[in-house]
Image (cartoon, coloured by chain):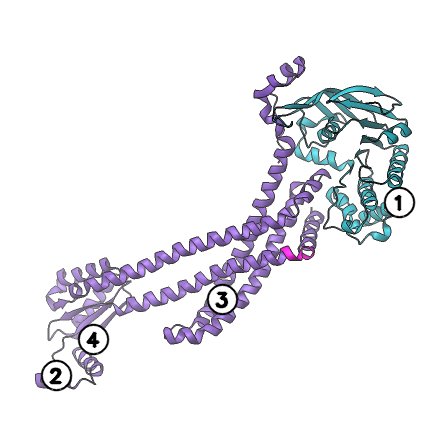
Amino acid sequence: MFTNIARVIKFAFQDFARNKGISIAAIFVLIVTIMVVTGLFFFQGITSYLTSEIQNKIDITAYFEEGTLEEDILNVKNEILKISPDIKNIEYISQDQAFQIFNERHKDNPVLAKALEQVGSNPFLPSLNIITNGDPLQYEQISDILQTSDFGKLIDKVDFNQKKDTIEKVYSITTNINKFGILAGAILILVAMLVVFNTIKLAVDSSKEELGTMRIVGASNWFIRGPFIIQGVIYGFFAFIFCILISGLFAYLLSPYLGVMMPGFNMFDYFLTNFWILVLIQLGFGIAVGIISSLIVVRKYLILRDRLMVGHSSLEAGILVRVQVPQHQSAQFRGRPRRVES
Amino acid sequence: MIKFDKVTKIYPTHSSNGSPTAVLQDISLEIKEGEFVSIIGKSGAGKTTLTRLVLGLEEPTYGEVYFRNKNIRIAKPSEIQNIRRSIGGIYQDYKLLPAKTVYENVAYVLEVKGSSHGEIKKEVQKVLELIGLREKGNNFPKELSGGEQQRLAIARALVIHPKIIIADEPTGNLDPYNTYEVISLLEKINKAGTTVILLTHNREIINKLQKRVVTLVGGKIIRDEAEGKFII
């Protein structure tokens, strides 16, 4: 058993080394395929960063009645968190903080500064700033809770209705980006897998005659298939090595440029943070595609050869009248069970 | 050793007009251990189909084929594989493994059988020496001449110490000198006790051999003589 496994592995490495052109082509195609998957992985990282950034800019604010105690507001905050655990962030902003934020934001606008001066006192209300996962329904629910619960009497207003359209648009855009990503990813992976399949088919095609010879000398299906499957593993492994290096290099080189467009997103950090997941995806995908393609192609040929070799007689029942067959045989053997070679 | 019992083989669309053709018709033939049997006939007479039936590569439409009393139709895949491993096949197109060296081609059949590394090394070297290809052990088949390739195919057939050798037009691609060499070798092997089935349409070989000759015409046995001549 172990001797046979060792031999199958030896054949795989021999064929891999001797069919250099085919091996290089198969690895190259696998690299392209894995890079497509890797590209999608990075794309997913970028889109989730972008959507999260956009979603973080969308919020609703509950303004409390003037004079509401900070303690009461913090109690409301805790109650809201209990009722809606999906809330990403909820922040208490006191009257003073609101005033400071306004001043900071409009420090270059003398008109607003003068207007504020004329008011004389702090016109801002204490508030709770709430951010969810971006789902408009969730915002609406929180808005309803804030206004209809027991603590509704403490609340002056919730600005959900003013922001509703914006929230819905942003949510629709981010959802569509995710859907598009999944669809495009699925199509790209499918196309890439077909390319790999066809490349490996070419590799096995070149050994088609050999498969027949191996059968004639009594090789078992495992002995025939094994080397091709292991070659699939070798293709996948080499492709993975190249891909992980290329991915790291690209992430490192692109990181400064992407950082300009997306401050706060460091592609190389993303690569390092998700390194083992990426290893798993690239190695797993490469080897799985390599093995599955080899299995399907070799199986197809073995079945095809079986049909070519032993399949003719399966059609004969209905055409016997056209051939001169001894009478004793047609009566004796019609309907006899057939051996099926796997 | 091999028995064909009223065997008929029909290909549904074998002939040029697309209608079913009976390649073999009601063949009954028995080949005993140690015999040297030549099966002769024109191209398409059904000679190759006979060997394919023995190897389990075809299934008879009617009748049964027995190899050492084992009915091939009902044999399990592993039994079929064992039958193939015990038959030394020599073919006109050599059926070598092009990506393997001369040594590896011969070793492959022993590896398939599960022989040990030491045994493989010893047997392969011995048979390559016998066949005169020892010096070319590291060459690939494409680097050999036609005669050398055929000798390699013979070496591969011999290395398993087969009880039977099926040689399907083994001299078809060879010049007269190499033809003589191959036939002499088959005679030697037969004298050592191995059954040889020679499929050919070479008149000179048959007339010179003076062994049992089975003549096939149109899928039927028309003659079966102990010391036959090439008469079609």
Mark pair 4, 1: CA separation: 97 Å
Q: Is residue A76 left or right of residue B169?
A: left
Give percent across and percent down for residue A166.
Answer: 22, 64
Mark 3 vs mark 1, CA separation in Å: 59 Å
Q: Position of residue A155 (x, y in %)?
A: 12, 68
At 89% from the left and 34% from the top, the residue drawn is B187
Marking on residue A275: 3
Label 4 crowd bin: few (<14), some (14–19), many (20+), radius 10 Å: some
Image quarter in which the N terminus of chain B is found: top right
Residue at image coords 59%, 26% = A314
Above/below status of A49 relative to A236: below
The disc at residue A93 is: 4
Nearest to N terminus: mark 2 or mark 3: 2
Where are the magenta residues, as a range? A17-22
Three-letter residue code for mark 1: Leu
Neighbour class for label 2 at 10 Å: few (<14), some, many (≥20)?
some
Q: Which of marks 2 and 3 is in front?
A: 2
Q: How crowded is mark 1: few (under 14 residues within 10 Å), some or many (20 or more)?
A: few
Name the secondary structure under disc 4: strand
Mark 4: amino acid: Ile
The stretch drawn in magenta includes residue B157: no
